[in-house]
Amino acid sequence: MIRSVRFPLIALCLLGAVRLSAADMKPDSMTMTSEILAASAKVSAALAADDLAAAKSAAAEVAEHANMAKNAGIASKANALAKAAKIEDARKELSGLTAAVEPLAKGQKDYVVMNCPMAGADWVQAKGKTQNPYYGKSMLTCGGPKQAK
């Protein structure tokens, strides 16, 4: 009698553990949004610092998180930036990545969508001082929060 009760009980415990670990591995959309935004802000900050290597690394991180969230649009834009050969190319790719990421930033308290009128382009950054990724150190504070249309 004890053996016949023990086996189903052990099987149920194992099944429950497998289901819990599978649920833990499933990306939560809020967590993925946060990860994508954080990595996207790193891209902008790296370009503002004129650091192509860091921008490419952060763009690869955006792509990784976007793939986990099954967001092919963001992933493809991030991958394009990650493959940029020159900083000018990365800056050109940033506007497409920003357009894809911008909807995720709406309503987020820690991020702001900025606009550079000279470049005619937007970027997402962590709240704080303006850090223009399109002109980097040469015009770091050019731009401001994007006005809602």
Image (spheres, rainbow, N blue to C red):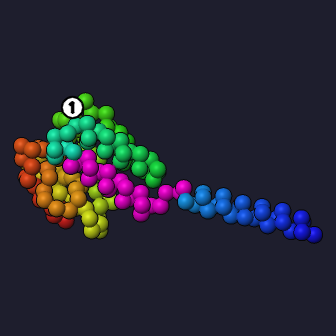
Q: Is residue 140 left or right of residue 67?
A: left
Camera-nearest residue between 130 and 12: 12
Q: Which amino acid type corresponds to the residue marked 1 in the rendered image?
A: Lys
Across and down, in percent, residue 135 comes to 11, 44
Q: Is residue 20 left or right of residue 38?
A: right
Across and down, in percent, residue 121 comes to 17, 49
The image quadrant of residue 143 is: bottom left
Residue furthest to the front in view is 2
Across and down, in percent, residue 39 comes to 32, 51
On screen, residue 146 above or below 49:
below
> What kind of secondary structure does the magenta stretch mostly adopt?
helix
The boundaries of the magenta stretch are 25-45
Picture residue at 36% right of the left edge, 45% below the top: 61
Work out which quarter of the rendered image holds the N terminus and state it.
bottom right
Report if residue 132 lies within the magenta region: no
Picture residue at 75% right of the left edge, 65% below the top: 12
On screen, residue 14 above or below 50:
below
Q: Label 1, secondary structure: give it.
A: loop
Across and down, in percent, residue 98 comes to 26, 51
Camera-nearest residue between 121 and 112: 112
* Residue behind mark 1: 86
The image quadrant of residue 110 is: bottom left
